[in-house]
Amino acid sequence: MAVVAAIGLVALPNNGQAEGVLLKSQPAHNARLSQFDNKISLWFSGNVGERYPSIVVVNSQGQRVDNRDVGLDIAPRSHLHVTTKPLSPDNYTLRYRVVTEDGLVVSGIQTFSIIP
């Protein structure tokens, strides 16, 4: 029985950080921006799989404002990005969904505002 327990402990990852956690976003969550370069970037703690990464950006009326051009950097594959149409002052919501290389589905919602 002790041998089985020891084997189980060896098989556990010990990197101290969960795979696929959103580490950083640009713009940051709840940011209030007077200038915006029409680019959104998300960085994750591990490699994102190439299958179906998604970022959708909508305005306060629920209209989609991104250009549907989600891109995943080849190296490192932890950076996901999308561009938007020129944005006017309003509140915006972005929804993201990725699948890590390990098959973990990671999704979330962030908001930001463009101010005059």
Image: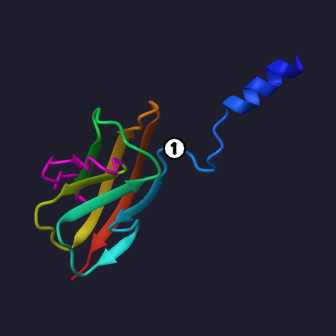
Question: x, y percentage for residue 17?
Answer: 59, 50
Is residue 63 part of the magenta span, yes or no? Answer: yes
Is residue 73 part of the magenta span, yes or no? Answer: yes
Residue 86 vs 100, above or below: the answer is below
Residue 74 vs 25, above or below: the answer is above
Q: Give the prevailing secondary structure in the magenta stretch.
A: loop
Question: x, y percentage for residue 63?
Answer: 18, 52
Amino acid at circle 1: Glu
Q: Residue furthest right?
A: 2
Instruction: Report the side of 53 relative to 104 (left or right).
Output: left
Q: Which residue is rendered at x = 61% and y = 47% of the image?
A: 15
Residue 19 vs 31, above or below: the answer is above
Q: Label 1 belongs to which residue? A: 19
Q: Residues within 10 Å of mark 1 (few under 14, many from 20)?
A: some
Instruction: Report the side of 105 relative to 17 (left or right).
Output: left
Question: x, y percentage for residue 22?
Answer: 45, 53
Give the residues drawn in magenta, as a range.
Answer: 58-77
Colour convention of the picture: rainbow
Foreground pick, 61 / 74: 74
Foreground pick, 6 / 51: 6
Which quadrant of the view contains residue 32?
A: bottom left
Quarter that holds the C terminus: bottom left
Q: Which residue is rendered at x = 40% and y = 44% of the image?
A: 47
Question: x, y percentage for residue 45?
Answer: 47, 51
Quarter that holds the N terminus: top right
Residue 74 vs 92, above or below: the answer is above
Instruction: Report the side of 66 relative to 19 (left or right).
Output: left
Q: Which residue is rendered at x = 38% and y = 68% of the image?
A: 28
Q: Which residue is rendered at x = 75% and y = 31% of the image?
A: 9
